Amino acid sequence: MVRRKDDIQRALTAFDGRRVAPLKDAVGLPLTPEAETAILDALAGPDQVGATWMVKALAEAGRLSEAQLAEAFANFPKLTEPDAILHLLQSVQYAPGAAKPYLPDFVRLAGSDKLFLRVWTFDAYCRVAALNGPMADVTARIEQGLTDRSKAMQARARALAREFGVKVQQKS
């Protein structure tokens, strides 16, 4: 059994903005290429929260190619819903190279008044910056994150420090 384009549209229509069961069900089976395209086509429209949730779920499962994630990331400038932006930011870890062109968007999003957008923008920025050159910038950003007043930002900075092998100063 596979999910088709109309299955995706039905799931997006059934999604109430909270309960993800219809979305989870839709991506729980293999997708036809038309179904994958339907998800990507829905990213910048009124179903962007549900569609980006699907992209994130598929990325986490390793079911989207880097090219498909690049297509998804191309929607960063068009997204208007904080949850949709968050889902794509959380997907950057699966294909940071595909997110390189959107580094300016990450810089813009870093000033968000939504804590989780700031935290995941920080994560996406560090991952893309690590591909762009010297680790000194990434190390400085991680050290800055460790001193942030937000415990969530500190936790993300610690996780990135471990992942990138950044030695952090222990507070005395």
Image (cartoon, rainbow, N blue to C red):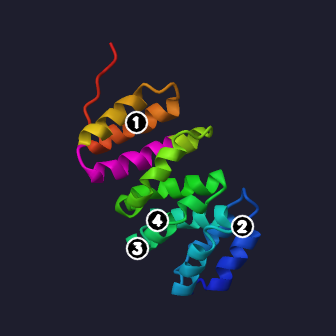
Residue 65 at least partly seen: no
Distance from label 1 to label 4 (Cα)? 22 Å
Q: Do labels 3 and 1 touch, CB within 8 Å?
A: no
Q: Residue shown at 52%/58% (left/top)? A: 88
Q: Which residue is mark 1?
A: 157
Image location (x, y in percent) of residue 75 = 55, 65
Mark 1 residue type: Ala
Residue 138 at least partly seen: yes
Q: Quadrant of residue 67?
A: bottom left
Q: Residue shown at 31%/44% (left/top)? A: 163
Earlier in the chain: of badge 3 and badge 4, it is: 4
Mark 4 residue type: Ala
Label 4 Cα neighbours within 10 Å, binned few <14 / some 14-19 / many ≥20? many
Report the number of numbered marks.
4
Q: Which residue is mark 2?
A: 46
Q: Which residues are magenta?
A: 119-134
14 relative position to 105: left or right: right
Image location (x, y in percent) of residue 60 = 46, 62
Q: Quadrant of residue 143?
A: top left
- Assign a secondary structure to mark 3: helix
On screen, residue 6 above or below 69: below
Earlier in the chain: of badge 3 and badge 2, it is: 2
Distance from label 2 to label 4 (Cα)? 21 Å
- Assign a secondary structure to mark 2: loop
Q: Which residue is mark 3?
A: 67
Distance from label 3 to label 2 (Cα)? 23 Å
Which mark is nearer the camera, 3 or 1?
3
Earlier in the chain: of badge 2 and badge 1, it is: 2
Which mark is nearer the camera, 2 or 4?
2
Distance from label 3 to label 4 (Cα)? 12 Å
